[in-house]
Amino acid sequence: YCEGDTLNLMGLYIRYALLTGLTDVAGHDASLLSLEAYLREHGTSRPHLSEFLDGWRASDRPAPGLLGLG
């Protein structure tokens, strides 16, 4: 569970960086996409990462992940 907590905290930090002006929407989205790519890449050898990513993608709470697309 600790690794899942860390991944959630990373997602929160990425949003915090956007809200405080440390990054813009493009940087926010690029960071989330990079994190998602990491989870996809390592999910085959570490299945819990794939499970985390599946759950993360299925959720729209507290807000949608990517902000600049669509």
Image (cartoon, helix red, strand yellow):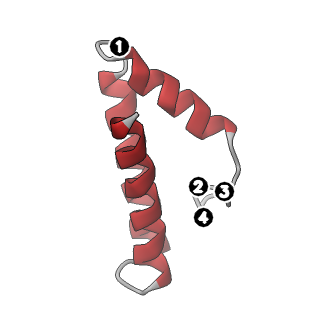
Contact between marks 4 and 2 (CB within 8 A): the answer is yes
**Residue 43 visible to an observer of this rendering:** yes
User: Whole-percent x and y of residue 21?
Assistant: 41, 86
Report which residue position mark 2 lands on. 65
Contact between marks 1 and 3 (CB within 8 A): the answer is no
User: Whole-percent x and y of residue 48?
Assistant: 41, 21
Tell me if mark 1 has few (under 14), some (14-19) or many (20+) residues whose alpha carbon lies within 10 angstroms of its own.
few
Kindly report the distance in space between the C-alpha atoms of the residues bearing marks 1 and 2.
Answer: 23 Å
Residue at the image position 34 percent from the left and 37 percent from the top: 3
Kindly report the distance in space between the C-alpha atoms of the residues bearing marks 4 and 2.
Answer: 6 Å
Mark 4 vs mark 1: in front: 1
Residue at the image position 40 percent from the left and 15 percent from the top: 47
Which residue reaches farthest front?
1
Contact between marks 1 and 2 (CB within 8 A): the answer is no
| Quarter of the figure with residue 70 | bottom right
Report which residue position mark 1 lands on. 44
Contact between marks 2 and 3 (CB within 8 A): the answer is yes
Indicate the amino acid at tag 3. Answer: Pro
Tell me if mark 2 has few (under 14), some (14-19) or many (20+) residues whose alpha carbon lies within 10 angstroms of its own.
some
Report which residue position mark 4 lands on. 67
User: Whole-percent x and y of residue 34?
Assistant: 35, 47
Kindly report the distance in space between the C-alpha atoms of the residues bearing marks 4 and 3.
Answer: 7 Å
Tell me if mark 3 has few (under 14), some (14-19) or many (20+) residues whose alpha carbon lies within 10 angstroms of its own.
few
Report which residue position mark 3 lands on. 64
Indicate the amino acid at tag 2. Answer: Gly
Residue at the image position 57 percent from the left and 39 percent from the top: 56
Q: Nearer the viewer, residue 1 or 39?
A: 1
